[in-house]
Amino acid sequence: MGTQGGTALISTTAEWRALKEHFANEIDKTHLRDLIADAKRCEELVIESDGVYCDFARQRVTHDTMTKLYDLARAAGVKEKINAMFNGEAINSTENRAVLHVATRAPKDKVINVDGKNVVPDVHDVLDKIKDFSERVRNGEWVGETGKPLKDVVAIGIGGSFLGPLFVHTSLRTNPEAADEARGRQLRFLANVDPVDVARSLNGLDPETTLVIVVSKTFTTAETMLNARTVRAWIRASLGEAAVSKHMVAISTNLKLVEEFGIDPDNAFAFWDWVGGRYSVCSAVGMLPLSLQYGYDTMEQFLKGAWSMDQHFANAPFEKNLPLTLGMLSVWNVSFLDCPARAILPYTQALAKLAPHIQQVAMESNGKGVAIDGTPLDYETGEIDFGEPGTNGQHSFYQLIHQGRTIPCDFIGIIKSQQSVYLKGEIVSNHDELMCNFFAQADALAVGKSAIELRAESCPDALIPHKTFTGNRPSLSILLPELNAYTTGQLLSLYEHRVATQGFVWGLNSFDQWGVELGKVLASRVRTSMNSKRTKGEIMTPGDGFNPSTTALLNRYLAGKAK
Ligand code: F6P
């Protein structure tokens, strides 16, 4: 069991079994309360890379656990897989593609070959085009149909063509230097095909001063293309047919479809099939809209930050490798501690869109049921990612994390806030208040509170069970010196490579997403039937091929619309 084509699942290795035994015989009998009292251990369980400081002393691990986890990484061939990724091998085997989002942030002099061709010059050609175009739009040289500068941008795209850019935009908009660059400009996103999102994204915008970017790797995604046609109609209705070439540009790997849509190929910004959608924010997908908003120089820093973490991931030894270590800790939590989820808890509002972005990066990548060779997996993979900035989350779902399910938490704190508020007479500034919670929550989860402590505090007996916290709940704490374009790039790359490490160990393909297809096919069947029934004024019948529940739901919907 567990093999196909000669490849054994990682769960059949001695290293995996050793970790299972280690958990049962040792870790299951330890408590974080005791583990974090050990100064030497705390000192050991810290890794820093280029200013990104991560303390994982609140994970349920010892020195021995870490050794065994790194042994597991070796058994899984993680180093070889990292090399294969950076060397442009087609490690996304189900789509026969290289996985080279790292090339989108490579410096000009780097050589990264795909099928014998160095792709870095192509990357920099597109970056040069983005720099030139964004500067011309920003300085008013590129104007709209009526001669007015284009100060507002609507980026239409969904999934990876939306979530990464939104995360970076949210991270930068309150950074004073970036905000300075963005003065007088607006960047909006239109992702959902919901007419409410169309209305929201266009509300108050004037087509005369608006630039629309259609962002789609495939240029076939139904929702994006419908939204693109809707917004094109909005431009045409106001400014005429010819205005499209001045007000609409595209980002895609499918330049043929871009042209067929009616966008001038000169106004198309390419990327390549070796950049996965959810890994595409460093390509034109993020670089164009964000350079228009914050200036190319700001965004160049973002690429540099991501590249710094890429280099660290590719070169640091396992024991000092931050993304790899965090990936191994996630494997530990999911596969050995049976934790189903992970909470991403940034203590800054500017990272409010980190969790939604990582949700796609991690869950679309590692939510798989089979190994890379098709063998059904006999262990769980991936985790349910969710999160909110602290302290908001504390007043929402932390109760469950403290007393309900065990959910490993990533606490992310910023040493120097983007903003400063210090009300005279207060003990601490707003940011210090926020960060006090950052430090306190991690310890509350680890240590908990015992009945003995409660009694010593004269807690009424009846309340003791309710106020007792078992503790022993894992978390890790990441501290960034500040939040700017560079550190946002580092954070992005950290999470991307952590997810890749997990996938490498679980032996699956983290770079395809076949699970998304089934729903798309069914939606297309519904679309065809709905259109035909509405045109003929008919209702759905059992003969239309939908189950009784869907037939009834569709009929209720169609009847309600007809009223
Ligand atoms: O949801 C599936 C998916 O293929 C994602 O992986 C991708 O990010 C998204 O759709 C959008 O695809 P596209 O950029 O081709 O429009």
Image: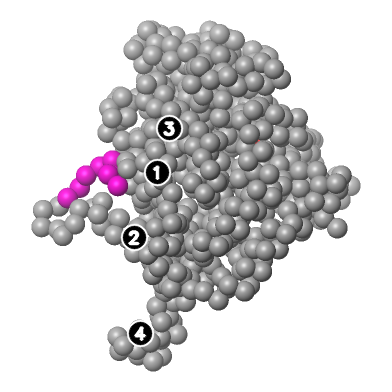
Label 1 – label 2 distance at C-alpha? 17 Å
- Ligand 1 closer than 8 Å to label 3 CB: no
Residue shown at the point (56%, 30%) measured from the top left: 102
Quarter of the image with the N terminus in it: bottom right
Quarter residue 179 falls in: top left
The quadrant in which the C terminus is found is top right
Tell me, for residue 439, which label it has, or none: 2
Task: Check if residue 177 falls in the magenta segment.
Answer: no
Identified at 30% across, 55% down, the residue is: 435
Disc 4 or 1, which lies upstream in sequence?
Answer: 1
Report the amino acid beneath label 3.
Answer: Gly
Q: Is residue 463 left or right of residue 408?
A: left
Of 449 and 151, the residue lying toward us: 449
- Graded by Cα atoms within 10 Å as few (under 14), some (14 to 19) or many (20 or more), the crowding at tag 3 reads many
Q: Secondary structure at mark 1?
A: strand
Residue receiving disc 1: 52
**Nearest-to-viewer mark from 1 and 2:** 1
